[in-house]
Image (cartoon, helix red, strand yellow):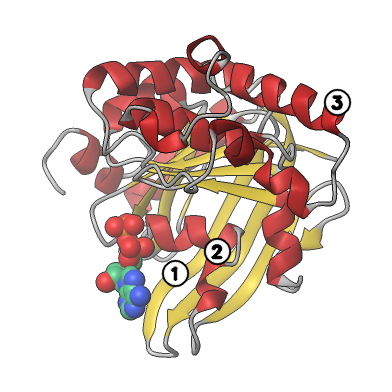
Amino acid sequence: MTTQTLSTFSSQSAATEQDSVKRTAAISSASSVKETLRAEVKNLNFWYGGKVHALHNVNLPIADKKITALIGPSGCGKSTLLRSFNRMHDLYPGNRYEGEILLHPGAHNLIDMDPGLVRLTVGMVFQKPNPFPKSIYENVVAGLRIRGVSNKAELDARAEESLRGAAIWDEVKDRLHTSAYGLSGGQQQRLCIARALAPKPDLLLLDEPTSALDPIATAKIEDLLSDLHKETTVVMVTHNMQQAARISHYTAYMHMGEMVEFAPTDTLFTSPAKVKTRDYITGRFG
Ligand code: ADP
């Protein structure tokens, strides 16, 4: 895997002279942070239907076994960027990418790979829990069965490991073969996280994973994510800045399809390099 200095950077196009001075300072203060990169977005552009230019030359490093949060006002391109990682846009005709999303080790460009192969290695959890109309057990092992795992002992072990990883094992261990629809919304979302974890994805994408949940269920998911990163690299969209501040290690602020600023989460929220970022996190904008 590539070991690099994770530089704080800001988009060139939006840089003012004053910002540029601040950016230089931020780069040197962040340059002591050494991270192993799991992925890198490089000069990524994306068009919906060949017309709507939703991502503009986006660059973003993704640190291995860390949580990277994407924040920004509605419509700024967070979901578009997240969905590019698992090539979800390919399900609709006319959408087009330019640029690279490199997956390490090996620097495989996810944009050039077969989308089906990409989805085998990049897991995703959506806003609303979407369990399959099957038992809890069959939900968790679904991805393993697709990959050809049929040995019962292995399926059982991976199901337990994933359900434990998603902090729901104790609540479901005695009802594994009952319908997933019998679970609460928060439990269903943790089941969906377990389902995404079971195939041991290289990247786990979370698209506002708690926005449909109550505060107690949200707190459980945040707790589990805080532990999850020890094994898994997470990229998460959230419209909740407090959530980003609580659980992510790195935060990327987007605005109108551009990556305005990327930094260690503490730095971004306490001393952002860009005026646009500061206005957003202080509630002056967005
Ligand atoms: P966010 O997740 O930050 O709210 P999105 O990534 O959903 O933003 O949207 C980014 C831009 O792309 C917006 O201008 C939005 O209107 C546009 N967009 C999103 N989905 C589509 C689509 N399916 N077709 C055309 N334009 C879209």
Looking at the rendered structure, the kind of residue marked 3 is Ala
Judge left or right: residue 205 versus residue 21.
right
Look at mark 3 in the image and give the residue it sits on: 153
Q: Nearer the viewer, residue 35 or 211?
A: 211
Asked if the residue at tag 1 contacts the one at tag 2, i.e. Cβ–Cβ closer than 8 Å, the answer is: yes
At which x and y percent is residue 243? 33, 26
Residue placed furthest toward the front: 178
Q: Residue at x 51, y 38 (%)?
A: 192
Of the numbered discs 2 and 3, the one sitting upstream in the chain is: 2
| Quarter location, residue 270 | top left
Q: Few, some or many C-alpha atoms within 10 Å of disc 3 (few <14, some 14-19, many ≥20)?
A: few
Look at mark 2 in the image and give the residue it sits on: 84
Judge left or right: residue 250 versus residue 283.
right
Q: Nearer the viewer, residue 133 or 142?
A: 133
Q: What is the tally of numbered marks visible in this picture?
A: 3
Q: What numbered label is drawn on residue 55?
A: 1
Mark 3 Cβ and ligand 1 under 8 Å apart = no
Task: Identify whether 172 is placed above or below 83.
Answer: above
Task: Identify whether 15 is placed above or below 215.
Answer: below
Query: What secondary structure is found at the residue carrying circle 2?
Result: helix
Please indicate, yes or no, whether residue 255 appears anywhere in the rendered image: no
Q: Residue at x 36, y 42 (%)?
A: 208
Judge left or right: residue 141 versus residue 78.
right
Looking at the rendered structure, the kind of residue marked 1 is Leu
